[in-house]
């Protein structure tokens, strides 16, 4: 297969990524069984760490697969995006119960590649928990005149944000008109990871400023 053929490379990667995800599922099942049968806390902790590593590998594979696909831009509301993210994260990682979600129905309209954006947000949460297990990350949306900003507010204590992942992923989102950046909370100096999404129209609605 010529390396200059991008279509063939995509097919090859998808095939091997599918095989890797099957192997990850097998490891996850074995780790679950090990955790249930473990006779001491140390072995149970090892099984839990294995499951976390597998979750991260699977999330990275999903993101890589989405990067290979053509963008599929859709228009949806802010509430729809948050619901998609929440459901996806719950299916990927039990630590999603530690997230603090806003109660939003509907909201302003935004246009983006929802699958890629949701997967990036899920991977971001997993990377945060890798550095700060069980962190209660707060999701705080902020609607401005021409954009929506999704702020992930990190706890005051802990090792800080996964800056490497933010830097690596910002260029992927920039291609779709989105911006991902690290900031400091204006009042108490907590870390914020902010995703800026342009509004489809200049609409009113939620105006929750952190």
Image (cartoon, rainbow, N blue to C red):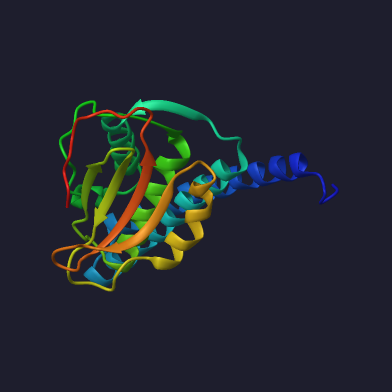
Query: Front-most of 15 and 183?
Result: 183
Q: Residue at x 47, y 40 (%)?
A: 116
Where residue 56 sits, quadrant-wise, is bottom left
Q: Quadrant of residue 38?
A: bottom left
Q: Is residue 175 above or below residue 206?
A: below
Asked if residue 26 lies left or right of residue 95, the reply is right
- Residue 76's spot in the image, x, y percent? 36, 26
Residue 188, relative to residue 65: is it above or below?
below
Residue at 28% from the left image edge and 74% from the top image edge: 159
Residue 139 appears at what percent x and percent y?
22, 48
Image coordinates of residue 75 in percent, x first then y, are 41, 25
The foreground one among 181 and 147 is: 147
Instruction: Name the residue nearer the viewer: 155 or 183.
Output: 183
Can residue 29 be seen from the camera position used here? no
The image shows residue 160 at horizontal and vertical percentages of 29, 70
Using the image, determine if residue 101 lies above or below residue 51. Answer: above
Asked whether residue 119 is in view, the answer is yes
Residue 97 relative to residue 84: left or right:
left
Q: How many marks?
A: 0
């Amino acid at each position: 297969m010529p390396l200059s053929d991008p279509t063939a490379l995509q097919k090859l990667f998808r095939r091997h990524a599918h095989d890797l995800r099957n192997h990850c599922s097998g490891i996850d099942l074995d780790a679950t069984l090990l955790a249930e049968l473990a006779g001491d806390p140390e072995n149970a902790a090892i099984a839990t760490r294995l499951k976390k590593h597998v979750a991260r590998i699977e999330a990275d594979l999903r993101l890589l697969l989405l990067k290979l696909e053509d963008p599929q831009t859709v228009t949806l509301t802010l509430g729809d995006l948050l619901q998609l993210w929440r459901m996806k994260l719950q299916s990927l990682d039990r630590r999603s119960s530690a997230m603090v979600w806003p109660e939003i129905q509907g909201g302003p309209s935004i246009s983006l590649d929802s699958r890629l954006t949701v997967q990036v947000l899920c991977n971001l949460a997993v990377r945060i928990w890798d550095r700060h297990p069980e962190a209660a990350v707060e999701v705080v949306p902020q609607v401005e005149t021409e954009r929506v900003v999704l702020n992930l507010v990190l706890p005051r204590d802990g090792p800080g944000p996964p800056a490497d992942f933010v830097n690596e992923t910002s260029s992927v989102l920039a291609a779709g008109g989105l911006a991902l950046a690290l900031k400091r909370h204006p009042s108490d100096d907590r870390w914020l990871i902010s995703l800026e999404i342009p509004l489809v129209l200049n609409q009113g609605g939620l105006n929750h400023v952190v």
